[in-house]
Image: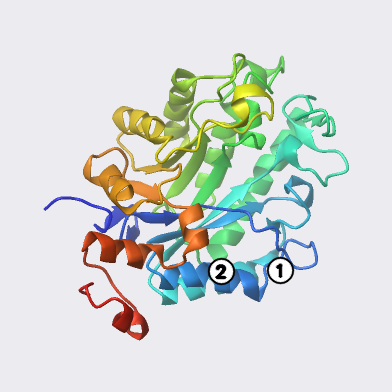
């Protein structure tokens, strides 16, 4: 049988009913700017699970208050925040979806931090604060905070952890020659910080729980890195413990060609294909993949193993069910909604 968008996939101890992923998308809706979820978040994610999405990745959730993009972002820096994440997980599980959560630190892009931190004291742009260059002892503290946040996510019942190593956030800041001008071991080996975070998190979660990394494959900047650099980093990240690559691009600068790499349907598929060709691990493709035929072809043509649909799922929580109907695929339909999908066979 042909593997397609609605074929199940197993990654370690997690089995997804289909290859459709809701990628992490910040909602900037934390309760009272304290990093806690609200009932809105439960509805937001559970609706996409009811709509047939195989894997829900909860938005960028931060390891410390000053690691947030804004004070309206979610956090897992204290135990009290576990309960809210657990409610999201429980609601999504009840609807048949698996749940991952993206653990992160914004680094120099923490706009509300009094003094943001980074690999080097280089501001994001002329309107941004100059970050404090992390000392080696401060790096050790942050790495432990990644691990502690992951432990809290496990207590909340998630099925997988994703680390955010893309889009100009802290792990990306260390791995890029644009933002890492250090002369110590973290400057000599641009992947060292990411490797240490991965290893610490890997050792803090169950052995059979998948660990994802969202990565920017290229930077589109004359002084930034290209695909060869990111593939070399990825090889070391695999050794450190990554099980799945979620392949994106850009995000390190607002200036020039690095600000955006395009918007055409499937504009980042070549990057996912490069990772797919290089590594024998599951790959998630991203980049305007809301078209039903295109998203299905990504799987049937073996360009990637899963498809992340962001804007499509924001517009339509039932994208997965509608796409199954359009493609005449078999999938689970909630019995309450079966009259609306007479052409889909459960």
Q: Residue at x 49, y 72 (%)?
A: 47
Residue 235 pos. (x, y %): 42, 27
Q: Is residue 190 visible?
A: yes
Question: Is 67 situated left or right of 112 in this image?
Answer: left
Q: Residue at x 67, y 68 (%)?
A: 37
For the C terminus, the image quarter is bottom left
Residue 20 pos. (x, y %): 37, 56
How much space separates mark 2 and mark 1, taking CA atoms?
A: 21 Å
Local crowd at mark 2 within 10 Å, few (<14), some, or many (≥20)?
A: some
Q: Are dots 2 and 1 in contact, CB under 8 Å?
A: no
Q: Residue at x 46, y 45 (%)?
A: 212
The answer to which quarter of the image holds residue 179 is top right
Q: Earlier in the sequence, mark 2 or mark 1?
A: 2
Q: Please, what secondary structure does the residue beneath circle 1 have?
A: helix
Check the image and name the residue furthest to the left: 1
Residue 148 pos. (x, y %): 64, 53
Disc 2 marks which residue? 44
State the mark number for residue 80.
Answer: 1
């Amino acid at each position: 049988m042909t593997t397609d968008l609605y074929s199940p996939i197993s990654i370690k101890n997690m089995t997804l009913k289909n290859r459709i992923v809701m990628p992490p998308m910040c909602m900037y809706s934390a309760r009272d700017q304290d990093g806690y979820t609200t009932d809105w978040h439960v509805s937001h994610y559970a609706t996409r699970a009811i709509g047939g999405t195989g894997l829900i990745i909860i938005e960028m959730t931060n390891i410390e208050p000053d690691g947030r993009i804004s004070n309206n972002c979610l956090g897992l820096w204290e135990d009290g925040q576990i309960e809210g994440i657990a409610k999201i997980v429980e609601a999504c599980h009840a609807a048949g979806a698996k749940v991952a959560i993206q653990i992160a630190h914004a680094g120099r892009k923490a706009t509300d931090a009094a003094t943001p931190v980074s690999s080097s004291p280089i501001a994001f742009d002329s309107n941004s604060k100059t970050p404090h260059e992390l000392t080696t002892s401060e790096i050790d503290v942050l790495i432990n905070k990644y691990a502690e946040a992951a432990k809290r996510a496990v207590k909340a019942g998630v099925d997988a952890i994703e680390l955010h190593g893309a889009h100009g956030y802290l792990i990306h800041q260390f791995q890029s020659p644009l933002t890492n001008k250090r002369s110590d071991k973290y400057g000599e080996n641009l992947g060292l910080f990411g490797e240490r975070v991965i290893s610490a998190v890997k050792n803090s979660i169950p052995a059979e729980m998948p660990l994802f990394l969202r990565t920017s494959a290229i930077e589109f900047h004359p002084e930034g890195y290209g695909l060869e650099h990111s593939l070399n980093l990825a090889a070391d990240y695999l050794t450190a413990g990554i099980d799945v690559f979620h392949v994106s691009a850009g995000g390190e600068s607002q200036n020039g060609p690095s600000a955006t790499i395009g918007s055409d349907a499937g504009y980042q598929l070549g990057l996912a294909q490069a990772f797919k060709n290089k590594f024998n691990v599951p790959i998630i493709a991203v980049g305007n993949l809301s078209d039903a035929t295109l998203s299905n072809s990504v799987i049937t043509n073996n360009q990637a193993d899963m498809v992340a649909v962001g804007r499509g799922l924001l517009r339509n929580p039932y994208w997965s069910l509608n796409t199954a109907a359009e493609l005449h695929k078999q999938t689970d339909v909630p019995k309450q909604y079966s009259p609306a999908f007479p052409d889909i066979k459960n």
